[in-house]
Amino acid sequence: MSALSTTPTDPVALRQAFGCFPSGVTALCALDSGGPVGMAASTFTPVSLTPPLVSVCVQDTSSTWPKLRMQSRLGLSVLAEEQDRVCRSLAGKGGDRFADVDWESSEGGGVYIRGAGLWLDCSVHAEFPGGDHTIVLLEIHGLTAEPDREPLVFHASRFRRLAA
């Protein structure tokens, strides 16, 4: 290995370095005043079995997170391999993010993306500062899993598919 050459304060180099780690892609959504509100998040991690917890990281500049964090229930959907268009829509900065997204809601107000490989019914358990992001722990209250559905994978700023 050659000497380390880039300083960790270069945001472009850091983004490229973090992109070397493949991740799944999730949608975190809820009903707000009768309509869906949601965002894409690729920083999803299972945390604990007891209590059942997962985490997502949300940019501090997000205008969506303040709306979501006030909801009693949040729907977290782990997107499937053919749902890259859904991810792009939910990651958009303007317009109706749900215009061409097939979704459904629960009685508790969580919004779920149809066709996803996993649905989690969650509530905010805790939040912690993490640099320019907030680390959000979500408690799981219910789930529906389809483990045979292939996941959407994000790597090196591109969507990828798993190979057999």
Image (cartoon, helix red, strand yellow):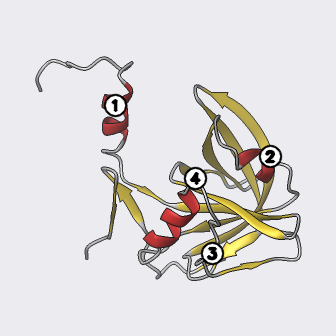
- Looking at this view, is 107 or 38 the one in front? 38
Marks 2 and 3 sit apart, C-alpha to C-alpha, by 30 Å
> What type is the residue that disc 2 sits on?
His
**Mark 1 or 3 closer to N-term?**
1
Q: Count residues near mark 2 (Cα–Cα under 10 Å), then give few for <14, some for 14-19, many for 20+.
A: few
The kind of secondary structure element at disc 1 is helix
The residue labelled by disc 1 is 12
Q: CA distance from mark 4 to mark 2?
A: 27 Å
Kind of residue at disc 4: Lys
Three-letter code, disc 1:
Val
Marking on residue 125: 2
Mark in the foreground, 2 or 1: 1
Instruction: In this rendered view, identify the residue nearer to me: 139 or 131.
Output: 131
Considering only vertical position in the picture, is 145 above or below 156?
below
State the image coordinates of residue 36 (x, y, percent, origin top left): 75, 68
Q: Which residue is mark 4?
A: 93
Q: Tell me the residue that label 3 is attached to.
A: 99
**Upstream in sequence: badge 2 or badge 1:** 1
Secondary element at image label 2: strand
Residue 146, image x and y in percent? 56, 81
